[in-house]
Amino acid sequence: MKGFINKRAMAMLLTIIMALQSWQLAVPPAAKAAGALPTGWMATTMNGTSTGTSIVKQEASSYSNGQFDIEAVDGKQQSVSGTANGDTVYFLYMPVEGDFTITARLVSVAGPPDNSAINANSRAALMVKNGVSNTSASFAASYFPAISTPNTGSLGYYRRFAANNSNSSSVSSVSTPVYLKLQKLGTTFTASYSADGVTYNSPYATQADTTTMASAALNVGLAVTHATVKFDNVKIVNASGTIFDSASSTTNPNPGTAPVAPTGLQATAGDNQVSLSWSAVQDASSYTVKRSKGQGGPYSTLVSNVTGTFHADTTASNDTTYYYVVSAVNANGESENSSEKSARPQAAVVPVSSITVSSSGGSTISTLSGTLQMQANVLPSNTTNTSVSWHVYESDGTTATDKATINGSGLLQASKDGTVRVVARAKDGSNVQGSTTITITGQTNATPPSAPTGVTAVPGDGQVTISWNTVTDATYYSVKRAMSSGGSYTTIASSVYAATYLDTNVTNGLTYYYVITSRNANGESGNSAQISAEPSGTPSSIRISSITVTGGTAISAAGGTLQLQATVLPSNATNASVDWFVFEADGVTATDKATINGSGLLQAAKNGTVKVVARAKDGSNVQGSAAITISGQTLPDTTIPEDVDGNQKVDIGDLGIAASLFGLTSSSPNWEAHKAADVNKDNVINELDLQLVANKIE
């Protein structure tokens, strides 16, 4: 009880600490006074007929030294239609014609100016709207701040194209500052992001609209709900050039046109060089080639003022991967980078021409499980890649073998007697191989079973029942009989699986002498001790002549059962009882795929095929069988629910994680990344989850 109280107190203490930290993070700075926006920028509050927390209140904005400070209380980006819904946001914008790109760095996010906390409706977004009402068609690249740590969150998008209204959270674990990009190309709108403002990821959202964003000039800018945010490095570019750039605090609605990015970039690796080519760009006066050793940059200028569409990078080194982009330049500026291409220079390849396989230990293995170290002599000596892969086959060089195994370094180990072929195959793609033959002896190390003991012979009327003790390593038994003591013996029954046999081919009044042998894959035992019997009397029993096993052919449920029946003929057999057995599909080998009880109930354990055998108990040695297919058997779930961090143990780290996420629900942003802390799976992380984790700590 004391341990439980300590764990409970620890969990509550962590919960209180995290709650205090969340409250401190949620307290925003004082509301900012409205300030003048840059030339061409406008601000509007789009509330429609919404009420309560769905409408924007206490909104304000200012602009200074290239930075937008924007704040608002309440509001909500809603993906359903209706005049009370839509984009109820505080929106700063300027009209832009044609295709465009807006980029901005989200510097920071804090609580709104009324000192309330960040909530599930808080957003900071780049937005384009076909109008300025809350129900106007729109597309937004949105940042979703985490409730307790608003400068860590996720990225998603909202679209409002006619009735096709939807939203999505696409990228998790994003921290400010982060660069956002919203782009329109024709009728396609995309959202992407970047850590450095130079290299943007592939769009995490791509949406097409053909009818609703149809105005010649769309309103492009920044949107905020229930938060205080800072944006800088805001830049809007369309086909005519830069419309706005906060870095230079200039607005230029009619600039000259910079060229478009080059296409068709190709990078071909050579020996200590890479050849680059690309398609010509109209209106380009020159090109700049850039290179990086990391995918996605950052890129350094390799050469500028290239007037053609080809460049050979002779500064490249072999065995190093380089990533290239090209930009086009004219008097009005530089294009964006082309798509990236990579190349890895390498020295000229010298292929393998021949392989000779040998061993300093000779060409035979004669000791039990002995080994032989193989070597491969690869020619020419200056071949680029001298490594080989090792294989062992039957003597034909193609058929798989169980006579030996070989490891990656060419160590051959014997398993069975015979001849094998060892093959060394070149790894350079030349398909060249060499081989040699190895003879294996001395691998037999098995003995036949011992002779049965406890043999008895019970005479009857026209029959003798012989029984003996089961031999542990025997597969089956043979019964031998003679008419005189000491033999000679004649085998009267072989492949007897039970430890009993009924001899009905006898004559009353004569004495018969019996011995039993046991057999397995390694041979036959010697004879058992001799036993004799003299049958007499009147016949009184009817023996079983056949057994048919029915009841089904498959089990598909995990741990499932199948009740099998044995139909015995003739129907008036004196003893109709049977013994039940289950083997591998060969009907001989013991199996772990299923078990069967004395009444014929088969229970599955592993996938595969087994043979069920019903064997007569009357000594007739008659048996019947059926093949059963087993599927659907899976390993048990060993997951520990209280193991929040997935390290296969429950400790104070799991409790700390659960405490840090206290209060999150399934509707919270980034729930998928945190729901492991919801131990009891009730869609909320609360005191019960902390208690469950604390109780599990050793």
Image (cartoon, helix red, strand yellow):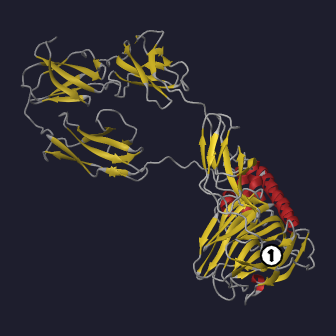
Which residue corresponds to the image point at 79% horizontal and 84% vertical from the top-left?
Answer: 45
Which residue corresponds to the image point at 41% horizontal and 53% vertical from the top-left?
Answer: 557
Pinpoint residue 157: horizontal percent, then vertical percent.
Answer: 67, 70
Q: To which quarter of the image does residue 500 belong?
A: top left
Q: Secondary structure at mark 1?
A: loop
Judging depth in this view, the residue of 141 and 547 nearest the camera is: 141
Judging depth in this view, the residue of 247 and 159 nearest the camera is: 247
Pinpoint residue 247: horizontal percent, then vertical percent.
Answer: 85, 65
Q: Is residue 359 above or below residue 150?
A: above
* Quadrant of the rendering where the C terminus is positioned: top right
Q: Is residue 424 above or below residue 260?
A: above
Pinpoint residue 22: horizontal percent, then vertical percent.
Answer: 83, 64
Q: Can residue 176 be seen in the rendering of this structure?
A: no
Q: How many marks?
A: 1
Q: To which quarter of the image does residue 446 belong?
A: top left
Residue 461 located left or right of residue 118: left
Judging depth in this view, the residue of 450 and 38 nearest the camera is: 38
Q: Residues within 10 Å of mark 1 (few under 14, many from 20)?
A: many
Q: Is residue 446 above or below residue 18?
A: above
Q: Is residue 494 above or below residue 441?
A: below
Q: Amino acid at mark 1?
A: His
Pinpoint residue 185: horizontal percent, then vertical percent.
Answer: 63, 70
Q: Which residue is mark 1?
A: 226
Q: Can residue 530 be seen in the rendering of this structure?
A: yes
